Amino acid sequence: MLLIPAIDLKGGRCVRLRQGRMEEETIFDDNPLRVADRWYNAGAQRLHIVDLDGAVVGRPVNIAIVRNMCTRYPDIPVQIGGGIRDQETVAAYLEAGASYVIIGTRAVQEPAFVRSLCQQFPGRVIVGLDARGSAVATEGWLKTSGHSLLELARQFENDGVEAIIYTDISRDGMLSGVNLEMTAALADTIRIPVIAAGGVKSLADIQALGELSGTGVLGAITGRAIYEGTLDFAEGLQLAAGYPRSQY
C-alpha cells in the first residue's frame, strides 16, 4: 500500500488547512521544494500536491513550483489537484511532468468533462471526491453538491478514471482518524483503486487502511500528521509497504 505525503501550496508556501477552511492555515515551510526533498529522501513513492489558491480561483497559481518538483524527482509519480477545470490546464500540468491530474469541482459539475479527459489522456485522470458525510463538496470545499459519493464514484469508474481520491472533509487536518466505514464502502462499490485522505494521524490508521488494501484501497494521503510528528513518515512507509496493492 502507498503512503503519499501531501504538499499543499498557498501563496508559494507549504501549508495545511483545517477542514478545508482557507482562513485556518498553518504554514509549515516557506520553501515547498525543501519539504518535497524531505519526503523524497525518506522514501516517498508518490507526491500529492494541491494548489489551494487554484482550487479557489479556478486556474493554476503555483504551476511553476509543480514543474520544479516534477523536474527534481523524475523517478516518482506526482499527482496534482486544485483548480483544474479545463483541458488546457490538464495539458499544462502533464507537460510540466505530472503523472496524474486530479479533477474535483468540474468533475462533479460536468461529468462529461471527465469522460472527454479520459479519452484524451487515458490513465492520467484521477477524480477527487471530497465529502461531508455522503454529500460531495465543490469549489475548494466551499459548496456542498446534491450528489452522493458512491453514486458519483460508480459513474466516474464507468467513464474510465484511473482512481478515486476520497477525502472526508470533517476529518481533514484534524488528526481525528480516517473514515474507515466510508472508505470500505467506496472500495466495495467500485473496482478502480481508492486513495483515502483526511484524518490519518498514526500507525494505527495505516494498519486499519492496510487491512482494506485487498479490497481496493491503493493508499493513503497524509499531511498534518507527518508535519506535526504524530506519524513518523519513514515508519509509516515501512508499515504500508507490508500491505499488498490490489491488482486491477
Image (tube, helix red, strand yellow):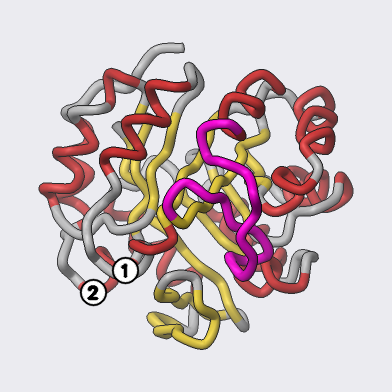
Percent across and percent down for residue 101 are 66, 44
Picture disc at residue 123: none
- Name the one closer to the observer, 104 or 36: 104
Percent across and percent down for residue 202 are 15, 56
Element at badge 1? helix
Q: Which residue is mark 1?
A: 224
Mark 1 touches mark 2? (CB < 8 Å) = yes
Q: Is residue 58 visible?
A: yes
Q: Is residue 35 magenta?
A: no
Q: Which residue is mark 2?
A: 228
Where residue 177 sits, quadrant-wise, is bottom left
Residue 116 drawn above or below residue 81: above
- Name the one closer to the observer, 59 or 147: 147
Residue furthest to the top in view is: 248
Residue 10 drawn above or below residue 73: below
Residue at image position (27%, 50%) is 178
